[in-house]
Image (cartoon, rainbow, N blue to C red):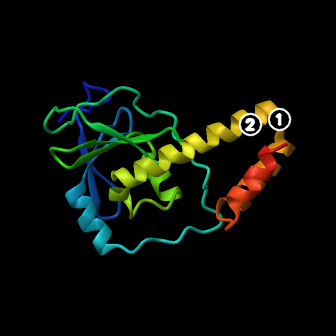
Amino acid sequence: MKCPKCRTTDLKPTNIEDGLPVMGCPGCDGASLSLLYYRDWAERNEPVEQSDSFDADVTVENDAKTALSCPKCSKLMTKYSVSSEHKNRIDLCGFCDEAWLDGSEWTLLKSLELAHKLPKVFTDQWQRKVRDEKMESKKVDRLKRLVGESDTAKAVEVRDWLKNHERKMAIVQFIGSE
C-alpha cells in the first residue's frame, strides 16, 4: 500500500498506541487506521484521563487539503472536521472503514479526549455541531470588529440570558422599540 498523501512511499506496519496497529508512512508520519482494529483497541483499553501537564493546545498544521485516495481500495475518502478550533480533518473511506490520520492527528485526538470516541467524529450530529460552533465563532468575531471586545462580551451575555427566558419576546420587542 502506498501513502495517500506522499503517493510514492510504501506504508509500513507500526503502532500508534500500544495494541493499536496501523500502516504508517515513514515520509509524512501519517497513518492508515482500520476502524475494525480501532474498535477492538477501544473496547480493550479504558480512556486515560488527561493530566494537567498534558498539552491541550496541540495543533497539527499538515492536514491534507485535497481529497485523498484510500490506500486500500483507491476510492476517494471523505473529510470530517475534528473540532471548531482546529482546521484538521480526519479522512475516512466509507467502503473500507479505513481512516487516514495526518502527522500527529492522533496526538490531537488524544489532547481533545477524542481518542476513544473517534467514530463520533464521523457522525452527522458531530459535523453539524462543529459547523454551528464555527459559524457562532465567525458571528462573534464579526461583532467584535464592528463594536469592540467589551460591547461584544455584553451582547453575548444578554443573548445567552435571553435564550431561555420565558418572556424573551416581550424583552426583545421592548429593546427593538427604541
Q: Which residue is mark 2?
A: 143
Q: Position of residue 38 (x, y in %)?
A: 27, 60
Quadrant, the N terminus: top left
Q: Position of residue 168 (x, y in %)?
A: 69, 60
The answer, for residue 92, to whether it is visible in the render is: yes
- Viewer-nearest residue: 175 or 149: 175
- Viewer-nearest residue: 51 or 147: 147
Q: Position of residue 170 (x, y in %)?
A: 73, 58
Q: Specify the amino acid type for callout 2.
A: Leu
| Residue at horizontal 81 percent and vertical 44 percent from the top | 177
Q: Secondary structure at mark 2?
A: helix
Quadrant, the C terminus: top right
- Please tell me how crowded label 1 is: few (under 14), some (14-19), or many (20+) other residues with Cα within 10 Å: few
- Please tell me how crowded label 2 is: few (under 14), some (14-19), or many (20+) other residues with Cα within 10 Å: some
| Residue at horizontal 68 percent and vertical 56 percent from the top | 169
Query: Total of numbered circles in the picture?
Result: 2
Whether label 2 touches label 1, CB < 8 Å: yes
| Residue at horizontal 24 percent and vertical 24 percent from the top | 8
Check the image and report above or below for 136 versus 145: below
Q: Specify the amino acid type for callout 1.
A: Val
Q: Secondary structure at mark 1?
A: helix
25 horizontally vs 172: left or right:
left
Q: Which residue is mark 1?
A: 147
